[in-house]
Image (cartoon, rainbow, N blue to C red):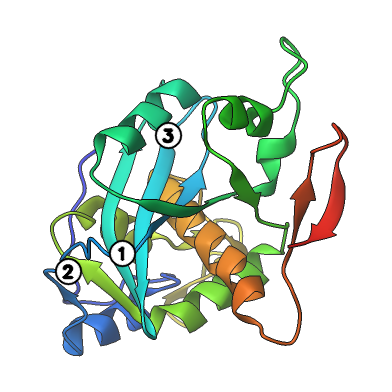
Amino acid sequence: QEYYCSFTGMIEGSYYSRSLELAESEGRITNVPHETTVEVETAWDLGVGDSTAIWFIQRVGKEIRFIDYYETTGEGLPFYVKVLREKSYTYGRHYAPHDIMVRELGTGKSRYETAQKLGIDFDVVPRLSVDDGIDACRNMLTRCWFDKEKVKKGLSSLWQYHKEVDEKAGEYEGRVTFKNKPHHDWSSHGADSFRTYAVGRKGIDKASRAPEFYDVGAGEQSWMAM
């Protein structure tokens, strides 16, 4: 897919354009170096028939630094684990969406279990409504820094991520009418993996309570406090 990263004008129906314009005006879209003494976290959107997208993140003080991004299609988990190992990062947490727990009909195993065997122990992010997840992203974006080159495609995904146009409703007072849900296209993968991270960290960052994730240690799906 062709993609670009331009923050010079508003995209109608965009969820994050205002937040990204603010980040650019504050100098938070720049060269962001990898801090070798800080663990790198990853956030995933796992595609089956379409793309898998992975953000690479470091947390330094109150800053959330997006230092790298990877996306491709047509590959299985072993390929992506190899991609991670080929990068010179020391990893911390890995965040995956709730559907990683779904068992495949052919093998009877979930991708969570497959990942464990490959050496990746995912934190499984609980399901939230899309609206709540987008709110979590907007709140997080005020503290985000982005490497303008290494995460260029991921940034473009966030910039282009927008509401679905309501074709039946047409225009109202000269403005396009949108449905209250995202339009699914190439930008969805990077935006969904970004939302995975925002929702996953939202629970961890709440000092008042521990986050909840799936525990499959006994081979059953249940909720547990980490």
Determine the residue positioned at 70% across, 27% down: 110
Contact (CB < 8 A) between labels 3 and 2? no
- Say the numbered circle drawn on residue 32: 2
Task: Give the left or right position of residue 215, taking residue 186 as reference.
Answer: right
Q: Which residue is mark 1?
A: 66
Task: Give the left or right position of residue 196, taking residue 211 as reference.
Answer: left
Q: Which residue is mark 3?
A: 51
Check the picture and name the quadrant holding the C terminus.
bottom right
On screen, residue 210 above or below 120: below
Q: Judging from the image, what secondary structure is the residue with disc 2 in?
A: loop
Asked whether residue 25 is in view, the answer is yes
- Dividing the picture into quarters, in which one does residue 29 lie? bottom left
How dense is the environment of label 2, judged by Cα within 10 Å: few (below 14), some, or many (20 and up)?
Answer: some
Expressed as whole percent of the image width and height from the top left, the position of residue 150 reads 18, 54
How dense is the environment of label 3, judged by Cα within 10 Å: few (below 14), some, or many (20 and up)?
Answer: some
Expressed as whole percent of the image width and height from the top left, the position of residue 161 reads 41, 60
Q: Judging from the image, what secondary structure is the residue with disc 1 in?
A: strand
